[in-house]
């Protein structure tokens, strides 16, 4: 039974005549059902010595079909999400660094020119810009 036997492409074989009961078909399973019917018919024609080769051939085709279904389902589920390890650029870091870069000289200028009120006005503006940016990102998600 451990013979290497070339099995014809089972999907191309017509199903055996007089098949009796046919359960209702679900979407995407008609090919698999026809393949299984073809394997059963080939087993009848070829005999039990080819059973292992027929089963292996059918299982190989079933594995390919299951893998394709899984790939399609996964692609449908994560189609709009980035791949792991590929993060979109985060411009929040740029805004934060820009705020600090502008904040340091503004602090010196405001404190020297207008003292406390100037300092509050400069940092109030920086906080307002960062808050507006954070709120705009929140509504985009």
Image (cartoon, helix red, strand yellow):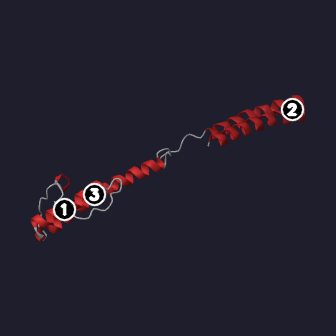
The reply, left or right, for residue 59 in relation to residue 104 is left
Give me the C-alpha separation between circle 2 and circle 3. 76 Å
Q: Residue at x 74, y 35 (%)?
A: 129
Q: Which residue is mark 2?
A: 118
Which of discs 2 and 3 lies nearer the camera? The answer is: 3
Q: Which secondary structure lies at badge 1?
A: helix
Q: Which secondary structure lies at badge 2?
A: helix
Q: Residues within 10 Å of mark 3 (few under 14, many from 20)?
A: some
Q: Residues within 10 Å of mark 2 (few under 14, many from 20)?
A: some
Q: Residues within 10 Å of mark 1 (few under 14, many from 20)?
A: many
Q: State the residue in front, 72 or 114.
A: 72
Q: Which residue is mark 3?
A: 32
Q: Position of residue 32 (x, y in %)?
A: 27, 57
Q: Residue at x 19, y 59 (%)?
A: 38
Q: Position of residue 81 (x, y in %)?
A: 50, 46
Q: Which secondary structure lies at badge 3?
A: helix
């Amino acid at each position: 039974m451990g013979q290497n036997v070339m099995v014809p492409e089972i999907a191309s074989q017509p199903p055996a005549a007089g098949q009796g009961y046919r359960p209702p078909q679900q979407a995407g399973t008609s090919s698999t059902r026809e393949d299984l019917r073809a394997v059963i018919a080939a087993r009848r024609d070829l005999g039990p010595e080819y059973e292992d080769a027929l089963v292996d051939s059918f299982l190989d085709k079933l594995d390919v079909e299951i893998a394709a279904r899984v790939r399609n389902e996964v692609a449908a589920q994560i189609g709009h999400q980035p791949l792991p390890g590929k993060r979109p650029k985060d411009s929040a870091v740029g805004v934060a660094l820009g705020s600090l870069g502008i904040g340091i000289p503004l602090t010196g200028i405001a404190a020297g020119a207008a003292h406390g009120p100037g300092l509050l006005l400069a940092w109030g503006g920086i906080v307002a810009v960062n808050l507006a940016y954070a709120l705009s990102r929140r509504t985009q998600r």
